[in-house]
Structures are given as C-alpha cells and as structure tokens.
Image (cartoon, helix red, strand yellow):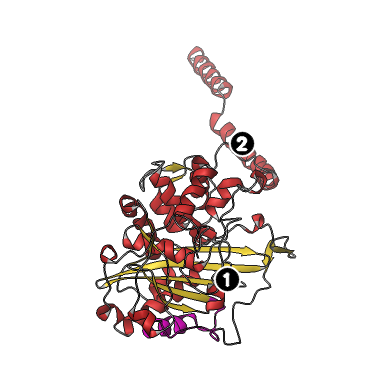
C-alpha cells in the first residue's frame, strides 16, 4: 500500500513538473501585443510628422498634371487666353502672396459717343441697330457682313474698325487649322500628342482653343507654309475695296524668334501679327460661303446699295476643308470658349472662334462667327479692348445679344440673300489692293 501511494505521488510530481516546463504561449502573446501597442503609440506621431514634412520627388517623365476639379474647370475655361507669364509687354505686379497678375490700364467702357462720324446711310438699319444695342457702352467695334457678296451690312465705331488692327489672339487658329488640313498634316479626328498620354483632335482643340495643339501644328507646318496660307486667306492684305480710311493689318515676313516662342506662338496667339476686324470678317465669310474671298464693300449711300456689285478677290480651295473645321467652330459655341453666346441666343446654329490676349496693359477680346439660319447666313466680328472685363467670351456674349436682337426683329425669317455663285464678278486679284 505504501508502494502504491508512493507511485501515485511520484506520478503527480512528474506531471506537475512537466506542466511547468511547457511554455505559456498565451501569456507571452498577450505581453507581446501590449508591448507593440506601447511602441506604436510612441512612434506613430513621429512617422506621421516625417511624412508631412518630407518632400516627395516629382516624376518628371510624365507631362500630365492632375489638378483639382475646380482648378481644371478654370483652366478649361481660360485655355484660349495667353498665359500671363509669357506676356512680353504686359505690366506685372507682385501681390502679397507672391502671385503675379497683370495690371490693365485700358478702359473696357466708354463715356463718349464712339459712333460719331460713322457713315450709315448705306447700312442695313436693322442690322446696325442690333449691333449698336449689343455693343452698348463697351469699348469696341462690330462689323456685320453678308458672306454671299461681301457687303458690309453694318460697321459700328468705324474709327476703330478701320484702324491698323491688333494681335488676333486665338482667332489666328482658324487660318492655321485650314493650312494644316490643306497640307494633310491632320484631319479633324487625328489625335495630336501633346506630351505624355495627353492628345487632342482638331474639333476639341478649336472648341477649347488649346494653345499646345496649334503650336504643334505651327511647328510642323513651318513659317513659310503658315505665312503662305495666311496671305491666301487675306491676312496682310487690305480686306476692303475703296473703303475710306481702312488701315492695313500686317503679317510679318520673318518668323518670331525662337526665344519668344517662334512659329508656334505665332500660330497659337498670333503674336507679331496684326489683323483688322475687316480681315478677320472676310476670312470667316469665306468659310461661311464655301470658299469665296470677297472684297468687302461698305456702301455709303442708298444709291450705292442699289448699284452694289460683288467683287471677288480670289476663290479659295477650301470647300472640302469646311466640313473638317466647322465641327470645332460649332463646338466652341456649344460647350467651348464661346458658350456664353448661348445664354442669349440658341435658335439657330452659330459657328465661331474666340480670342483673348494683351498688349502693354490693354486686353483684347475677339469673337468672329456666322449664324446658319434657314434664310441665309450672316457674319459678325466683335472686337473689344480694355481691361479685365474684356476677353473673348465677353465678345461671344455680346454676339449672342446681336443675334437675339435680329431674331426679335424677325430678321432671320424675312432676310433674303443672293447665293454667292450667282453673284457677278467685277474683278479678281491675288495681290494687295485698296
């Protein structure tokens, strides 16, 4: 019996010793977890602070930039404008936040009668009144043209309209687009790579007035071809025939130096180019009528209207190109840089192009367009100059008022025009003429 008890006791001792020698894994895991929590609480703030203060290197291989939605919308709406940092003659001021902005010294509004001296007896009174009302007290001019014969229907503020002109800004892109299409460099659907994975076709580039796209086309064309087509489309020539007081807009004979942007900048902003409202109007009229570049004529009397005879300067071989460029001009009004026009007028399609740039503290705002109505087309050019309220979209907005005024007077349902191909030809010319 003693032996039996001893055996049992021995077995118990051995069992206890064996249990004590087995590691307490659960306890160790609990201690390890507690230690990890303590270390995490100590070091996490330091890691977060290091991340917040460490500058992450940028990846320079990609040309794409990701902006916020608000910034993207602002850039999208202002792509037609010249970046302030590249203005050669603008006055720049540094603000407290070290941002640079342009100081404008021009006045966008007038307090005098700029219509004094206008010769109006040969103008269409309905068209003129619509233009006068649309321009209001803005510092600018309006030129309305019948694209089927080159007759100037109205010219408001004729002193400015007949002046030596101004930088065409982004309206120069129309002639560049036609040149690139004629040379078969692109079609309206050809994607043009603008860096990284970013590309645009002509329709979208015209709609949003993308500068990089047209700089690329300009470099591919080269200065000689760019100049050749610009001259063919009437830039660098007098647009009118015997229009008293008309000054000549100039297209340079030498390209812009590379240090100033070269031919690319000439094709995106028209820098170093001078265009008059009449020249731009004649170009847009040739697009509206299928390729006939008329001498513009401004009748001064009722007899001049009765005896009016169209005069063709030259016939442009752009008929097949018009369906390629028209979607971009239409998109500019539908959702692009000229969409402000639709706030006032949307009855009939309007195709156009805006332009905004500055010179020595004065901002220019251009919009050239034509309305495609059931009873014919009418071309109108708005040119504004002044300060910050002046820019291309504002000119487009005023054009909407102009078309609205005509529509309210039933002009589009009563006006009748003679087809361009039936118009008599008084003379033809390929040179500069006055």
Q: Compute the Cα span from label 2 to label 1.
A: 89 Å
Residue located 58% across and 58% down the image: 82
Label 1, secondary structure: give it: loop
x 55%, y 85%: residue: 117
Q: Is residue 195 left or right of residue 331?
A: right
Q: Position of residue 52 (x, y in %)?
A: 67, 48
Q: Residues within 10 Å of mark 2 (few under 14, many from 20)?
A: few
Left or right? Give the position of 25 relative to 323: right
Number of other residues with Cα within 10 Å of mark 1, as a class: few under 14, some 14 to 19, many 20 or more: some
Q: Is residue 138 magenta?
A: yes
Q: Which residues are magenta?
A: 115-140
Q: Which of the 4 image quadrants contains residue 313?
A: bottom left
Q: Quadrant of residue 35?
A: top right
Is residue 341 rendered to the left or right of residue 220?
left
Residue to which mark 2 is pinned:
31
The residue identified by callout 1 is 163
Question: Does residue 335 appear in this view?
Answer: no
Mark positioned earlier in the residue sequence (2 or 1) = 2
- Measuring from the top left, give residue 73's x and y in whole percent: 49, 60
Position of residue 200 measured from the top left corner of the image (x, y, whole percent): 43, 47
In depth, the one of 159 and 325 nearer the eye is 159
Q: Position of residue 182 (x, y in %)?
A: 39, 45
SS for callout 2: helix
């Amino acid at each position: 019996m003693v032996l039996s008890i001893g055996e049992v006791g021995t077995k118990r001792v051995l069992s206890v010793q064996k249990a004590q020698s087995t590691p307490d894994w659960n306890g160790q895991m609990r201690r390890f977890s507690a230690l990890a929590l303590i270390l995490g609480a100590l070091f996490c703030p330091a890691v977060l602070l290091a991340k917040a203060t460490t500058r992450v290197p940028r990846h320079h291989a990609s040309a794409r930039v990701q902006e916020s939605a608000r910034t993207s919308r602002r850039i999208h709406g202002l792509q037609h404008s010249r970046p302030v940092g590249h203005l050669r003659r603008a006055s720049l001021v540094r603000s407290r936040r070290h941002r640079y902005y342009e100081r404008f010294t021009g006045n966008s509004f007038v307090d005098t009668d700029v219509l004094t001296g206008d010769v109006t007896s040969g103008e269409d009174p309905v068209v003129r009144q619509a233009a006068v009302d649309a321009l209001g007290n803005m510092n600018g001019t309006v030129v309305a043209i019948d694209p089927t014969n080159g007759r100037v229907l109205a010219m408001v503020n004729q002193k400015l309209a007949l002046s030596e002109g101004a930088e065409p800004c982004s309206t120069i892109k129309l002639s560049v687009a036609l040149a690139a299409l004629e040379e078969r460099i692109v079609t309206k659907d050809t994607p043009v790579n603008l860096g990284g994975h970013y590309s645009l076709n002509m329709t979208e580039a015209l709609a949003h007035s993308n500068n990089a796209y047209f700089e690329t086309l300009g470099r591919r064309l080269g200065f000689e071809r760019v100049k050749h087509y610009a001259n063919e489309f009437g830039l660098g020539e007098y647009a009118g025939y015997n229009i008293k007081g008309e000054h000549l807009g100039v297209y340079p004979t030498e390209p812009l130096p590379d240090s100033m942007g070269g031919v690319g900048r000439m094709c995106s902003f028209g820098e170093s180019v001078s265009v008059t409202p009449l020249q731009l109007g004649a170009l847009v009229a040739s697009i509206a009528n299928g390729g006939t570049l008329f001498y513009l004529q401004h009748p001064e009397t009722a007899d001049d209207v009765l005896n009016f005879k169209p005069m063709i300067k030259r016939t442009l071989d752009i008929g097949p190109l018009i369906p390629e460029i028209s979607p971009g001009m239409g998109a500019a009004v539908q959702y692009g840089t000229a969409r402000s026009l639709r706030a006032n007028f949307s009855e009939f399609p309007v195709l156009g192009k805006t332009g905004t740039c500055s010179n020595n503290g004065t901002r220019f705002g251009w919009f050239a367009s034509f309305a495609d109505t059931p009873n014919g087309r009418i071309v109108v050019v708005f040119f504004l100059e002044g300060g910050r309220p002046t820019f291309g979209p504002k000119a487009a907005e005023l054009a909407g008022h102009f078309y609205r005024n005509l529509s309210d007077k039933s002009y589009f349902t009563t006006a009748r025009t003679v087809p361009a191909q039936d118009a008599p030809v008084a003379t033809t010319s390929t040179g500069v003429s006055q």
